Image (spheres, grey):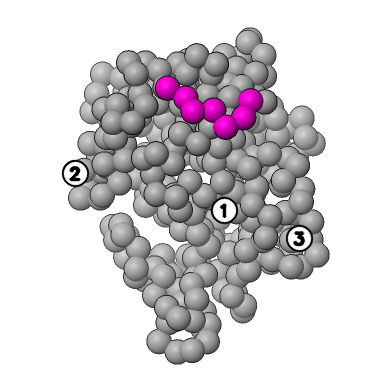
Amino acid sequence: MAATSHSNTFEMLVFRVCRYLQTCIRHNHLFITLHHPSVLDRVESMVVSEVYQRSSDFLSALAIPHNSWPGHFTSNTKMVHYLESLNGLKDPNKYIFHSDLDEIVDPVTLRQAMAEMNRGECDAITGSWQDRVTLEGDLKRVELNDGQIEEQFPLRCTYSKHFMPERTTKKVIVYRSNLRLTSGQHEVWCNIGADQLPGTYWNRQEACRAHVEGRADKATKTSYILRLLPESTNKPKICKTVVIIDHYKFVAGVQQHLADRMVNYKNLGLAWWKQSMEVFYCRYYFLKNAICIIVSQKK
């Protein structure tokens, strides 16, 4: 699990870790990467640095394996750190559950998809975001003494689709440990069709190279990424069941996180900075410190 740094990270982390431990996942089967905001050039960097330290101390007290990656956040730096951290894991009979801090997977649809994997019908499970928001639509803090997180953010809606391409609201959340995910965890590396390759059939080496070379952010050399991808024999199959992912992005602290990401992505020449700008500058449904919600369902 990866955790970016903003003022509400610690509370989100406590909720997620306790939920894992309550479902009988052993602490040494968890691995968490914390983003260390050591080079953020803003006043709030001291605040999020303190949040990082509290989060690290919390994980250490529970003996939960974790590490950190420093510097400005980009999906590429996050991906490379993830690939390096998992280097050596390659048993196809073992699964990796992969999510960001603000993503909680619906257990009912997850069990359905896991049954497909256990029967050998597929190799990776995808999920789709449903944004969780408050009854008032405000960007409130996640509180540790105010009930379960689902009770604090009871509404489900599809807010993100208004400013993000549809493919970016879908994530790969479970996969065999001989597979790896692209930046943003939207796809399995090398999982492109024969129609995108020179030949008429799937070839791992050609598929991996074509897929990696076709990425938007080329800050890391293609050869380095290819070295971090485990060997696999067959083209990965995606499970039919699409899992619901409750997405807790719209909480206190997201404004500054979006502002930092907007500036950083623009400086790197990445088009994604516009998505952060559209949210941050109220192009769609932001209203001062709140969100105007089109509710799809209430839980």
Labelled pair 1, 3 in contact (Cβ < 8 Å) = no
Residue named by callout 3: 116
Residue at 77 percent across and 48 percent down: it is 111
Mark 3 vs mark 2: which is more N-terminal? 3
Secondary-structure class at tag 3: helix
- The residues colored magenta run 292-298
Tell me: residue 38, above or below residue 82: above
In the image, 260: left or right of 244?
A: left
Task: Name the amino acid, label 3.
Answer: Glu
Task: Name the amino acid, label 1.
Answer: Val
Residue 157 percent coordinates (x, y): 53, 32
View extreme (top): residue: 145
- 3D distance between C-alphas at marks 1 and 3: 15 Å
User: Where residue 267 is drawn, which disc sits there?
Assistant: 2
Residue at 42 percent across and 22 percent down: it is 292
Q: Counting other residues with Cα less than 10 Å from the Cα at mark 1, is it few (<14), some (14-19), or many (20 or more)?
A: many
Tell me: residue 159, above or below residue 114: above
Identify which residue, 58 or 254, lies in the foreground: 254
Residue named by callout 1: 172
Quadrant that contains the N terminus: top right
Determine if residue 91 is in view. no
- Depth-wise, is mark 3 or mark 2 nearer the camera? 3
Residue 8 percent coordinates (x, y): 47, 21
Mark 1 vs mark 2: which is more N-terminal? 1
In the image, 145: left or right of 225?
A: right
Task: Name the amino acid, label 2.
Answer: Asn
